[in-house]
């Protein structure tokens, strides 16, 4: 693919290239409507590239959405109010519902995909 293509009802691009200005978020209500179908209130998708040692120092606070975190590569630890999970095998995932807070740390260079729904803040 040679670059991002945005049409009225479809688009194509590269997640790493297209998310530099949105902290990795590719799809969601906060994406400018000029980006076409990437702007939606239904779901949020993030392409997360995290070097070893990268952390989210603060915990989320009373999020009322459902979240899926999927490991593409690396080793990634997720701390939930319900316990801690370490993902190390491609395809490992954790899913949690409303009211569960979280924070995370990359134990190795990692790539993760985060999906949250709905996208309304």
Image (spheres, rainbow, N blue to C red):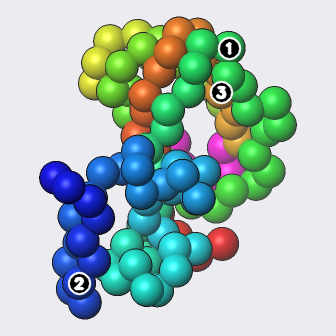
Return the residue at label 2. 7
Q: Is residue 46 above or below residue 42?
A: above
Q: CA distance from mark 3 to mark 2?
A: 35 Å
Return the residue at label 3. 104
Toward which corner of the image does residue 104 lie, by quadrant?
top right
Q: Residues within 10 Å of mark 3 (few under 14, many from 20)?
A: some
- Give the image location of residue 38, x and y in percent: 37, 72
Q: Is residue 51 above or below residue 59?
A: above
* The residue stretch that appears in magenta: 96-100
As drawn, is 22 to the left or to the right of 115? Answer: right
Q: Which mark sits nearer the N-terminus, 1 or 2? A: 2
- Give the image location of residue 117, x and y in percent: 47, 63
Is residue 11 highlighted in magenta?
Answer: no
Work out which residue is located at the far right of the displayed protein and give it.
58
Which SS class for mark 1? Answer: loop
Which SS class for mark 3? Answer: strand
Which label lies toward us, 3 or 2?
2
Q: Number of marks in the image?
A: 3
Is residue 97 highlighted in magenta?
Answer: yes
Query: Going 48% across and 69% down the picture, which residue do you hit?
Result: 28
Return the residue at label 1. 53
Work out which residue is located at the far front of the displayed protein and give it.
2
Q: Is residue 40 visible?
A: no
Which SS class for mark 2? Answer: loop
């Amino acid at each position: 693919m040679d670059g991002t293509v945005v049409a009225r009802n479809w688009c194509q691009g590269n997640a790493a290239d297209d998310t530099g200005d949105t902290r990795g978020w590719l799809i969601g209500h906060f994406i400018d409507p000029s980006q076409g179908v990437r702007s939606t209130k239904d779901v949020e998708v993030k392409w997360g590239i995290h070097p070893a040692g990268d952390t989210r120092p603060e915990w989320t606070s009373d999020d009322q959405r459902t979240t899926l975190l999927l490991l593409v590569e690396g080793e990634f630890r997720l701390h939930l109010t319900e316990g801690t999970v370490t993902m190390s095998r491609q395809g490992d995932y954790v899913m949690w519902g409303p009211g569960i807070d979280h924070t995370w740390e990359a134990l190795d260079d990692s790539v993760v995909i985060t999906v949250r729904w709905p996208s309304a803040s």
